[in-house]
Amino acid sequence: MNTISQDPPVLASELDFLLLRHHQDPHALVQILREWQAMQGWLSRSALSQMANTLGLTLAHVEGVAGFYRFFHTQPVGEYRVLFSDNITDRMLGSEALLQDLCRRLKVVKGQTRADGLVSVTTTSCTGLCDQGPALLVNHHQVVTKLTPSRMEHLAALIEQRVPIAQWPVEWSRVVDQIHRADVKLGEQPDPGQALSAACTRGPLAILDELKRAKLRGRGGAGYATGTKWQLCRNAPGQMHYVVCNADEGEPGTFKDRVLLSSCADAVVEGMTIAAMVVGARQGLIYLRGEYRYLLDHLESVLQRRHEQGLLGTAIQGQAGFDFDIVIHVGAGAYVCGEESALIESLEGKRGTPRIRPPFPVECGYLGQPTTVNNVETFCAVTHIALNGAPWWSSIGTPQSTGTKIHSVSGDCDRPGIYEYPFGTRIGRILEDCGAHDTQAVQVGGPSGVCLSASEFSRCIGFEDVPTAGAFMVFDRSRDMFEVARNFAHFFAHESCGFCTPCRVGNELVVRRLDKLQRGHGSTQDLDELYELDKLMHGATHCGLGAAACNPLRDTIAKFRPAYERHLKSLHFVPGFDLDAELSQARLATARDDAGAHLETLL
């Protein structure tokens, strides 16, 4: 007997309308869930059941998708859902104290909904606002930047008075680009359609050859040759070909794509349209991370304007048969969806679990069809190459790393924000320009990148030296690099999709050992165990998240070992302290904690 409670008829009718608006397409499930939750505040089981019945899916599937993304709620939550960004740079700016202050003012416990259902306060991963933090999100779409104690007092009062978010002070949600150094991609922008016209004049094969001669490599971190990727997609057999823009900029410390989407959206969309011409695609999709929901209206207006200008839709620029359109898919909070196959799974209305590869997306991607996935900055670069040519682009940077790279600079510096440099620029030059002082470390490329000590600041950004996805996090000598690594470890443990045991269990074991060290109960044996976990995860995980999760741990232990050893001191200098007995107890406790996880590994 079905005991699922039914929503009131008016709500069921509204849900029917929402499902019809999405053509009852099961691949739109994530968007349907997101929009329904925005209307109702949470996802009731009866609503999920109706979605399953109408979309031809099982309730288990729909509930599984709803439970995967951290921005979805299958239980009632606060009318005001406040999420503080928990990136390390937000913490350095005092976010933890501000969160506690807000909880005290609202009389709510972190992670719980207040008894009257008015508010809940907790943390989320990096919100892409590291240059103007501490920051928070309200109801997953309203940003509040540059938090202060006085702003917390005002915010608490507005919530208690149930003032609608739309009536909050406008300046609270003002997001500034903060472009401190612009080069070819962030400088003067071409007129809409200018690069596309040049590409159409040359033709798809000539543009493909231009990208290869320019040696353009993907700007998302992996650095795969763009021309080669497009060639593979173009040649792959399929009924349809697709172009996907990966705007799921979830790496902590990275916010360059936010700025490109805000100030250079035409160049990004134009690059996608050129890609469609080259690979033979008629449909494009932009996967916009859930934390950037506030950019949706702006991006929709850009697409609409380009339709009106004949730069999207049918017969683009008057060319019969050149038909291409773009839709925007908004994510729901899942870092792993930055991996291209997990992103495609999400686009198809599923949990964002990375696929087994091969086959690769260029052969079997969205809906099983050939798909090229490139990130925001890559498409922007394509537009400039199509307009100015390969010789111009390849004259910038180095022979192996051509062109420029945009960096999101945050942390201990006077001028956080966006900096664009030719590849081959020294790390030290970036530190000088951003006003960094007494720097002990720089995390380049985010937590999954590389941590550099002061002795390495003469190294240069580039695929042949210091590869980077765009994050540039600065730490001066007042910072505890152990705490930096511990924050990153918690991030990876929280963001693991849970598909494979080495990542799911390995990240949890890393967190437990680091937390044990933080409490002063660790030993050098724990450091040895962390090394072993790194080796295991690096070679055994299903996707790149687990393989890269220990990168900051490995770098900081090797380059800042005293930061770890300081957390062992409490075992040595306490009067009457029995070191051997305490170590034995600590090892026993760790063994008990880890036993279940180790058994799971064996099974």
Image (tube, rainbow, N blue to C red):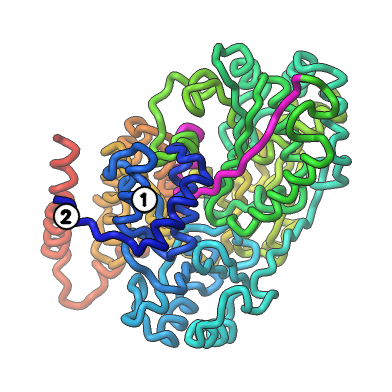
The residue at 26%/51% (across/down) is 526
Quarter of the C terminus within the rendering: top left
Q: Position of residue 511 (x, y in %)?
A: 31, 54
Q: Residues within 10 Å of mark 1 (few under 14, many from 20)?
A: many
**Above or below — where is 167 with respect to 442?**
below
The span from disc 1 to disc 2 (Cα, nearest Å) is 30 Å
Query: What amino acid is labelled 1 in the image?
Result: Ala
Secondary element at image label 2: helix
Image quadrant where residue 573 sits: bottom left
* Residue 494 or residue 160, whichever sits in front: 160
The residue at 64%/62% (across/down) is 131
The residue at 58%/31% (across/down) is 373
**Above or below — where is 223 with respect to 46?**
above
- Magenta residue span: 321-342
* Residue 515 or residue 408, whichever sits in front: 408
Secondary element at image label 1: helix
Q: Is residue 134 left or right of residue 110?
A: right
Q: Position of residue 251 (x, y in %)?
A: 53, 49
Q: Position of residue 307 (x, y in %)?
A: 77, 40
Is residue 328 covered in magenta?
yes
Q: Is residue 11 left or right of residue 507?
A: right
**Residue 593 image label:** 2
**Above or below — where is 137 with respect to 147?**
above
**Residue 344 image label:** none
